[in-house]
Image: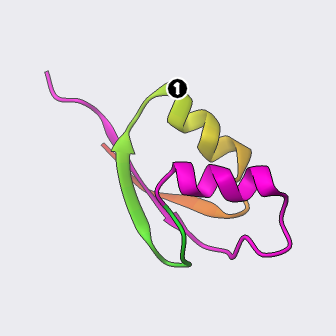
Amino acid sequence: MADKTVTIEQIASPSRRPADQRATLVGLGLNKVRKQSTLKDTPEVRGMINKIPHLVRVVDAK
């Protein structure tokens, strides 16, 4: 059974954002605009993505 993954890309800078949003980006493995990260598609990761939809976009969900 293959694990599902989701690839996300940072599309905006976290400057002038609350510290918890910056920490969420770091938790997702992102720190620079246009950087991509591939993670397991879990409810925890989806929750983190939904917390900062204005800073990231889903590139690919397999």
How many numbered circles does the render carry? 1
Percent coordinates x, y for residue 46 in the rendering: 55, 36
Name the residue type under label 1.
Pro
Q: Is residue 60 above or below residue 46?
A: below
Residue appearing at x 74%, y 54% in the figure: 21
Residue appearing at x 60%, y 61% in the figure: 56
Task: Place residue 17 in its image quadrant.
Answer: bottom right
Task: Place residue 41 in its image quadrant.
Answer: top left
Residue appearing at x 54%, y 29% in the figure: 44
Query: Quadrant of the image for the N terminus?
Result: top left
Magenta segment boundaries in residue numbering: 1-29
Left or right side of 1 for 55? right
Q: Helix or strand or loop: what does disc 1 sit on?
A: helix
Percent coordinates x, y for residue 55 in the rendering: 68, 64
Q: Is residue 46 above or below residue 15?
A: above
Query: Quadrant of the image for the C terminus?
Result: top left
Along the viewing direction, whichever of 50 and 21 lies nearer the viewer: 21
Q: Residues within 10 Å of mark 1 (few under 14, many from 20)?
A: few
Instruction: State the residue position of label 1.
Output: 43
- Furthest toward the left, the residue is 1
Residue appearing at x 45%, y 73% in the figure: 35
Q: Is residue 40 above or below residue 32?
A: above
Percent coordinates x, y for residue 42 in the rendering: 44, 28
Left or right side of 28 for 51? right
| Residue 37 falls inside the magenta stretch | no
